[in-house]
Amino acid sequence: MHLRPAINSDLEILYQHQADDEAIHMAAFTSEDPYDKEAYLKKWNRLLNDETINLQVIIVADEIIGCVGKYIMDGKAEITYAIDKKYWSQGWATKAVIDFLSIEKTRPLHAHVAFDNLGSQKVLEKAEFKKIGSMMSYAKARGKEIVEFIYVLE
């Protein structure tokens, strides 16, 4: 497995990964319409040119299986990651996040995860993020407020 900076031509594959019903449910905090391909491509084409964004694709056996990145939200650096569902529970997200942290040195780095996304919580904890709290947040993918856990890596 290795990481490389994302490029515009990767976005089609990344869109397909995130446009999965189960992936959307687990992510919980999604865009207004996570199936809107045009909006997804437009947003990420713009963000790839933003110097505050560090988006890396995760490659296994010459196949893009996901992405990991850092972005700024409300003045805080945040981590995000997503893996194609067929690669879930194989350790790739954990390895990718840990490898990404050796590239992306911004600290503190924050993460937010749905209370029931146990896989993502494990990824963060294995990468030495600490759970520092929780809050109720509106999860667009679920159409209701849910508990969101807040993690930080100092």
Image (cartoon, grey):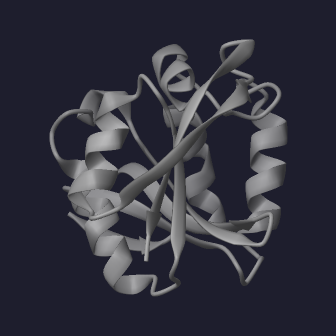
Q: If the image is split into quadrants, where does the C terminus sit?
A: bottom left
- Classify residue 94 by image quadrant: bottom left
Residue 91: image location, x then y, percent? 17, 46
Q: If the image is split into quadrants, where does the N terminus sit?
A: bottom left
Q: How many marks?
A: 0
Q: Which residue shows up at 61% across the image and 52% down it?
A: 11
Residue 119: image location, x then y, percent? 30, 34
Nearer to us in this view, 138 or 37: 138
Residue 52: image location, x then y, percent? 71, 80
Q: Is residue 1 above or below residue 49?
A: above
Q: Is residue 75 above or below residue 126?
A: below
Q: What residue occupies the far front of the structure in this picture?
A: 133
Residue 112: image location, x then y, percent? 55, 46
Q: Which residue shows up at 73% across the image and 13% down it?
A: 144
Q: Is residue 39 left or right of residue 53?
A: right
Q: Is residue 39 visible?
A: yes
Q: Is residue 20 above or below residue 100?
A: above
Q: Is residue 63 visible?
A: no
Nearer to us in this view, 48 or 78: 78
Q: What residue occupies the far left of the structure in this picture?
A: 90
Q: Which residue shows up at 57% across the image and 34% down it?
A: 148
Q: Which residue shows up at 42% across the image and 22% down it?
A: 116
- Classify residue 121 by image quadrant: top left
Q: Is residue 127 above or below residue 112?
A: below
